[in-house]
């Protein structure tokens, strides 16, 4: 008797993802470069010098160029990181493709020394919201159904909770929404190919679509999401996650009820009793 397979279904076809990334070009790396600049800016705000950094990424060449002293490893399911070896681990704009994002963060955390810093940048739920809408509209109109065509991406509240689930202290999650304009939907889809961010979903339909589908999609995009001057807009949301491996030297929240000063005194105002 064959036992049931309890393995959870995979979100990402890693072979297709690797193939997409091999087809990426330097021309399509502008969002990777933007992510790198944002990470560097955030590191300048941390009062710490990191001497043993590591980076997890699907695009090692561009991240290695910007962080020449870092150990750079691919974002495989089992990361090539040794426990307690680094004081900084950056997950560079690839966590959104992970079949097990919490597992990726836990592995990064284990690679850190005590009071080591984990940082991640990934695409969030508002990314390609315009393309997602017109794809759905066009596919329903043309076929009467829907199929997986754009990666489902997490919202900031859910992604921030991953830090706590991974056991990281002082978790912070924030986001930055970038709008990019394109000549038309065909130019956007070309850019996604150059970025290595085309459809790599495990459950994607592999049957090619007719050219008439994309013609209708482009018309719908033009109508619903114009950017002026005959162009269209596309959104890319970058979510940044930050957390520290626990250490006794870190700040701890006070026990509820342990305050010795009234909030009204600190604010220089009068306290009003709600029963009055």
Image (cartoon, rainbow, N blue to C red):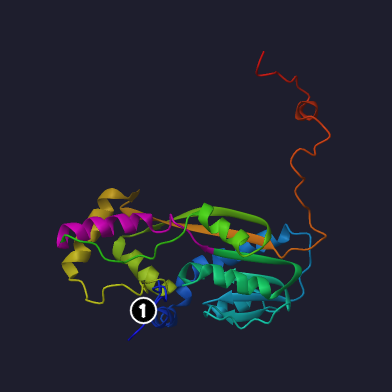
**Quarter of the image where the C terminus is located:** top right
Label 1: few (<14), some or many (≥20) within 10 Å? few
User: Closer to the camera, 274 or 99?
Assistant: 274
Observer able to see residue 93: no
In percent of the image, x 29 and y 66: which residue is there?
A: 186
In percent of the image, x 63 and y 63: which residue is there?
A: 39
Provide the residue span drawn in magenta: 122-143
- Where is residue 167 shown, x and y percent of the image? 65, 63
Identify the image quadrant of residue 268. Answer: top right
State the count of labels: 1
* Farthest-out residue, front: 1
- Which secondary structure is most common in the magenta stretch? helix
**Quarter of the image where the N terminus is located:** bottom left
Q: Tell me if 63 is positioned left or right of 208 in this view.
A: right
User: Closer to the camera, 2 or 244?
Assistant: 2
Observer able to see residue 261: yes
- Where is residue 195 shown, x and y percent of the image? 44, 72
- Where is residue 99 shown, x and y percent of the image? 46, 72
- Where is residue 169 shown, x and y percent of the image? 69, 59
In percent of the image, x 33 and y 60: which residue is there?
A: 183
Secondary structure at badge 1 equals: loop
Q: Tell me if 209 is positioned left or right of 52 in this view.
A: left
In percent of the image, x 52 and y 64: which residue is there?
A: 122
Identify the image quadrant of residue 235. Answer: bottom left
Q: Does the magenta portion include 147?
A: no
Which residue matches tag 1? 4
Identify the image quadrant of residue 179. Answer: bottom left
* Farthest-out residue, bottom: 1
């Amino acid at each position: 008797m064959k036992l049931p397979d309890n393995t959870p279904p995979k979100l990402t076809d890693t072979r297709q993802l690797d193939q997409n990334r091999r087809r990426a070009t330097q021309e399509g790396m502008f969002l990777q470069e933007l992510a790198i600049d944002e990470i560097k800016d955030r590191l300048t705000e941390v009062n710490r010098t990191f001497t043993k950094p590591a980076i997890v990424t699907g695009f090692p060449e561009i991240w290695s160029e910007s962080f020449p002293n870092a150990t750079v490893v691919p974002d495989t399911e089992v990361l090539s990181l040794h426990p307690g070896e680094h004081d900084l681990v950056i997950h560079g704009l690839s966590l959104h493709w992970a079949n097990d994002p919490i597992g990726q963060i836990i592995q990064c955390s284990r690679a850190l020394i005590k009071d080591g810093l984990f940082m991640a940048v990934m695409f969030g739920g508002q990314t390609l919201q315009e393309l997602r809408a017109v794809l759905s509209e066009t596919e329903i109109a043309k076929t009467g159904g829907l199929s997986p065509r754009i990666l489902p991406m997490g919202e900031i509240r859910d992604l921030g909770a991953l830090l706590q689930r991974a056991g990281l202290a002082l978790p912070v999650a924030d986001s930055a929404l970038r709008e990019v304009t394109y000549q038309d939907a065909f130019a956007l889809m070309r850019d996604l190919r150059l970025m290595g961010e085309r459809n790599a979903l495990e459950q994607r339909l592999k049957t090619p679509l007719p050219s008439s589908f994309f013609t209708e999609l482009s018309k719908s995009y033009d109508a619903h999401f114009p950017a002026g001057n005959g162009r269209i807009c596309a959104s890319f949301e970058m979510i940044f996650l930050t957390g520290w491996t626990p250490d006794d030297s870190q700040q701890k929240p006070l026990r509820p009820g342990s305050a010795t000063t009234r909030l009204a005194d600190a604010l220089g105002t009068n306290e009003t009793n709600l029963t009055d």
